[in-house]
Amino acid sequence: MGRFRTHVRAHLALGLPLVGSHLAQMAIGVTDTVMLGWYDVEALAALVLANTLYMVLFLFGSGFAFAVMPLVSAAAEQGDETRIRRVTRMGLWISTGFALGVLPLLWFSGPLLVALGQEPALAADAQSYLRIMGWGIVPALAVMVLKSYLSALERARVQLLVVILAAIANAGVNGLLIFGALGFPELGIQGAAIASLVVQLVSVAALAAYALRSFPAHGLFHRLWRPDPEALREVATMGLQVALTVLAETGLFSLSSVLVGLLGTVQLAAHGIALQLASISFMVPLGFSNAATVRAGRAFGRGDGVALGEGALAALALGLGWAALAMALFLGAPALLVGLFIDPADPLRGEILAAGRRLLFVAALFQFFDATQVIAVALLRGIQDTRLPMWIAAASYWLIGAPAAWAIGVWAGVGAVGVWLGLVCGLGAAAVFLSARFWRRARLVGDQAPL
């Protein structure tokens, strides 16, 4: 029990700043959602559509940054500073190349959204947002690489500070540009996009400056233009597998937005609010999962199977403990939570509250599944096992979750609640199969089997 407590404390020391960083990052999106919800429900619905496309591309590109974390943590455990520099720099290369490659999709997003069955007016507003915010994907993915690098070196507090300041700045600029305060032009959804772009640029500059000052021996940006084919191939291979794993899950949630979008503006607005609340909750196990990747990567780097297993149990205990609290909150105060996002004077407030309350009841059901699957896949990433988990995630979300969402929500006519029940099916399958994969692989690490 004493060793277990030691692992819990270690995960808390690294994980809590990462949780705070993720929550502060999420606060930027929540601020956009709340302010646009108070500005105009149509603008809120357009933001939901815009973020659906943006987040699919952003999270796919983040896969290359996520690959940097276990590679750097294992290299740090072995004292290999050259390898730390190589994989981080090539992570920046790949992330930047990907970001530039997907910019045209964001620029011409309107016709794509219309082709997916969305209302032309909402699609046009979403495109106006993405034509500004789309440029922010370049610094946003660079931020993800630098955060992975610093997390692997157990420097999480600076990330928390940078993101908190960014969230505060985003709220201030939003107030000026969405509503036209203090003589600034009233830009609505475009104002939210400008604020988010500015925040991403400032964030990447701050993290880069900290990395240079704290780890000058790594020389991250020295001759950054020089290619490193071996490290590039390694990061690209693992990163693509991680990206496809992430895409499998985020794609399912994006599909849910598309399916709910077919049901009308009220259902889509309620879905966006409930999804935002579920995403806020998810940031806590996500932060612990990042810590699990780093801790597992270090145990893997030194071949310590016992520490790997004990650390995994500690990470799961923290994630599931939070899931229980989130479930109680969603079941106990759904109307209060949803009501925070809607102007009391909005004529659609009552309909959105009713729809959002039902969706939060379903969200409560998948809290344990969501926490388990994200920690399991992070542990697998820490021991550099990414290929089969990619296929497990794809099968869970797209052979189980997606068909269930369509069948229950659309074909059976249950509506948005039915779509969300499909999410429960997909997350449950992923939690079971990914956990089984980790414990099987963990027994092969080191001379002794973990618990």
Image: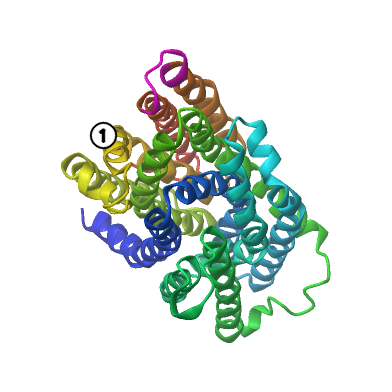
Question: Within the magenta stretch, is there residue 415?
Answer: yes
Residue 349 coordinates in the image, percent (x, y): 30, 44
Q: In terms of depth relative to the viewer, which is nearer, 40 or 21?
A: 40
Q: Report the amino acid beneath label 1.
A: Phe
Question: Within the magenta stretch, is there residue 18?
Answer: no
- Is residue 104 found left or right of 334 in the rendered image? right
Decide if residue 100 is in sight here.
yes
Q: Which residues are magenta?
A: 408-416
Residue at 39% x, 43% y is 275
Q: In terms of depth relative to the viewer, which is nearer, 193 or 215?
A: 193
Residue at 58% x, 40% y is 247
Decide if residue 322 is in sight here.
no
Q: In terms of depth relative to the viewer, which is nearer, 86 or 369?
A: 369
Q: In terms of depth relative to the viewer, which is nearer, 205 or 112?
A: 112
Q: How is the image coloured?
A: rainbow
**Residue that mark 1 sits on:** 361
Secondary structure of the residue carrying tag 1 is helix
Residue 395 coordinates in the image, percent (x, y): 55, 25
Q: Is residue 393 above or below residue 196?
A: above
Residue 442 coordinates in the image, percent (x, y): 46, 41
Residue at 42% x, 60% y is 22
Residue 92 coordinates in the image, percent (x, y): 69, 64
Q: Is residue 119 above or below residue 156?
A: above
Q: Quadrant of residue 436?
A: top left
